[in-house]
Amino acid sequence: MGEEDETTGEEMMKNHDEVPKMSAMDESLARASLTSGVHPPHADAIDYPLVTFFQMKTLPSDEHIQRGILDELAKFPRFRCKVEPVVEGNVSGKLQWVPSEIVFQKHVTRRDDVNSREELEAIKNELLVRPLQTDVPLFDVHVLSSSKVRSRNNTNNRSSDERSDGEENGGESSIKPVLAIRYSHAIGDGVHAVKVLEHIACGLDGEPVKMVHWKRSKKKKEFKNASAMMLDCLYFVWVFMVGFCRAVFTAFGPADNKTVIRDEPVKWSGKREITTSTPIALEELKAVRAAFKCTINDVVVSCIAGAVQRYMEARDCPFTKKPSTRVRAIIPFATIPKKEMENMKKDPYTLKNLFTFVSLRLSMGPCSATERLKRTMKKTYDLKRSPEAAITIFLNAIIGKLGSAMQKQTVYDYMSRHSMVLTNVPGPVERVRLAGIEVETVDFACANLINQVSVLSYAGEIRLTLVTDPEVVKDAHTIAEYFLKEIKSLKIAADKVSSEAAAA
């Protein structure tokens, strides 16, 4: 035991002095934070910080935040380094991580003037589009609460299980404190960000955080004759060719149709609105997965497509009845080699950006939820067999050598042709503590040039989060409601399939 603890201590000391190296991807994302973002000047956009909103059971104190969040983040080299040009003043040139300090007053903002849910939502929307401070490490923490909650916390020092009459009756003081952590994408991708949560949070019992791992239901192996194998080979060649063309030509091809969720051309209005669905049990999605032999991701993508279809129908969109309607999602695709996965386990404090994007066309047009899921399963299966991700990485490397202006234009051309960015993140299995306080709900959000759609699981439930332009997407909450209805429809179908299988 002593020898193992010594090694761990040495690794932590080494980690504390480490200055991380910047990859080409890191530079692009860091440059976005130092300038106007990842898009060219004519887009008039901003850099989009990644934001996680934690609804806390009680209000954390300054000491809680210092010890439970800032001190823990300081163990990660990228959280305690700021970004500077290698050549002073040349932001478009090479960039580097430079050791800095995490100062409470510069990184933590408290607001205790939030006295209604409307005010809370307005502040959360504003945090989505507020740039990060660039002369310090690229993250910040915001604590939002009402004055009554703060006053009670300071004077009564009551236990977390006690509730006032106002809270029971849904008054002003029923607004639970929200802790928001914002950080630049330059610090790390989604897979690595999960490592951060695992280290700054813990289970309610003090044990390490347990994360959900989504796996595909096993399919029975089928015997295939020579003709079937030949058809499979031809189909693989076709999928390869389509994937190659998508990777090479998407940024220069046609844009998605101008529907009620997308303007054409895409433009940045400076406004974004966050909308979150009511939670739904993860077990319902698992039941669908088991019945239809698919993945949780297949279910999520299919239900989002169905929700958009319902939203279009309710607003008499002219593309409602056309299965050929082009509504595509940009999917972040992790590109972590097996060796790198092993390194991540050995060195929990190293963060990287090892991802690219792939394009997925959603299954639109009027059809049953079951049929939409089957169509989605085929699309996602083909995408996994496609070389699109690998070719996109290769193209990004070439474009990266042509300068930041070319990079920004290519990113804009690619992104502006789609309707949304879609992320699906498995989270903690059970409730966790952050800064010593129990976390009731977790929402991940990010503003973007186009709609941002995220699904996050937490403590046995999932929630859909939409970040949309309120001037384009009216009543975004109805999309969240339709998403839940699509899941319910699939669950009914799944129960029927399971019943028939049991009867047989």
Image (spheres, grey):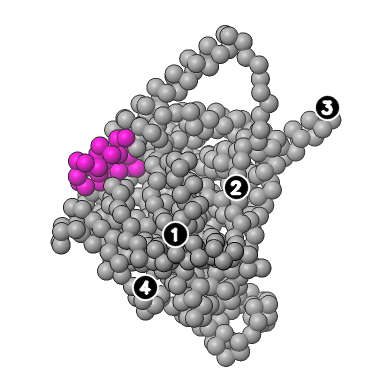
Check disc 3 and report its element: helix, strand or loop: loop
Q: Which mark is residue 102?
A: 4
Q: Is residue 339 above or below residue 170?
A: above
Q: Position of residue 44 (x, y in %)?
A: 25, 54
Occupied quadrant, residue 20 = bottom left
Boundaries of the magenta span: 394-416
Q: Residue at x 41, y 55 (%)?
A: 351
Q: Position of residue 344 (x, y in %)?
A: 47, 51
Q: Which mark is residue 504?
A: 3
In this rendering, position of residue 424 left or right of residue 249: right
Q: Is residue 149 above or below residue 304?
A: below
Q: Residue at x 61, y 57 (%)?
A: 210
Q: Earlier in the sequence, mark 1 or mark 2?
A: 2
Question: Which amino acid lies under the numbered mark 4 shown in the image of this protein?
Answer: Ile
Q: Which residue in the protein does label 2 denote?
A: 213
Q: Earlier in the sequence, mark 3 or mark 2?
A: 2
Question: Which amino acid lies under the numbered mark 1 shown in the image of this protein?
Answer: Tyr
Q: CA distance from mark 4 to mark 3?
A: 63 Å
In this rendering, position of residue 472 left or right of residue 135: right
Q: Which quadrant would the N terminus be assigned to in this image?
A: bottom right
Q: Which residue in the protein does label 1 denote?
A: 349
Q: CA distance from mark 1 to mark 4?
A: 16 Å
